[in-house]
Image: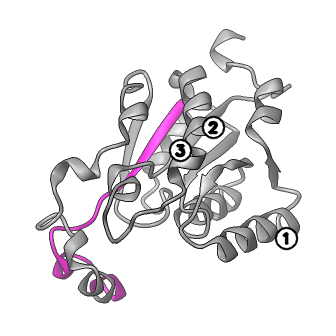
Amino acid sequence: MLVERWVHLCIDMQRMFAEDTPWQVPWMKTVSPEVVEVASRFPQRTIFTRFIPPRNAGAMPGMWQAYYEKWPMMTTNRLAPEMIGLVSSLHALVPPARIFDKFLYSPWVDGRLHSALGSEEVGTIVLSGGETDICVLAAALGAIDLGYRVILLKDAVCSSADDTHDASLQLLGDRFSVQVEIMRTEEWLIDATDPDLR
């Protein structure tokens, strides 16, 4: 049984990754049932991150400008505003689930999320969402650095690249085995408890 306070941090399950855009993650729909199962069972312990592109490439620093020069159609000047939103099955859970907007791969950079979780005495991060080898990986590594216990639900994360998805799971499981546990959603749900009920 989980003995400390935890949150389900669901990474970037947004329409712009689920639908027909250059950033579509085709098998996001495959992991959606697992993500929905966790989030709907514990909406009050769920935080959905959203990756928010800039207005245009010039609004970002450094190499992010080159990144958005490659993907100008994904800036908010050109992307339909509703595409930033969560997929409908998860949007329906807000509130009590929360939304945390970020502008980079990692949700930890500016300290807001860590500060909020610290005030709630959270010690464990349960990760789902996409992409395994980009934003999920950044969230996991940041959580490790900040001292959280990380549980990654391997059937609730997805990528548009199978090889690097698999490599990321192997990296986290092998090189960070003290700080990261990788398990299936069903296995985790057997032991999960709602901290608000303790």
- Give the residue at mark 3: 10
Residue behind mark 2: 34
Asked if the residue under mark 1 is in contact with the one under mark 2, i.e. CB atoms within 8 Å, the reply is no
Residue type, label 1? Arg
Where's residue 182, x and y in %? Answer: 80, 51
> Disc 3 vs disc 2: which is toward the camera?
2
| Tag 3 near tag 2, CB within 8 Å | no
- The residue range painted magenta reads 46-65
Dot 3 or dot 2, earlier in sequence = 3
Mark 1 or 3: in front is 3
Vertical comparison of 69 with 161: above or below: below
Give the camera-side residue of 168 and 49.
168
Amino acid, disc 3: Cys
Residue at left offset 27%, top offset 52%: 84
N-terminal of the pair, mark 2 or mark 1, is 2
Residue 175: numbered disc: 1
| For residue 89, side relative to residue 173 (left or right) | left
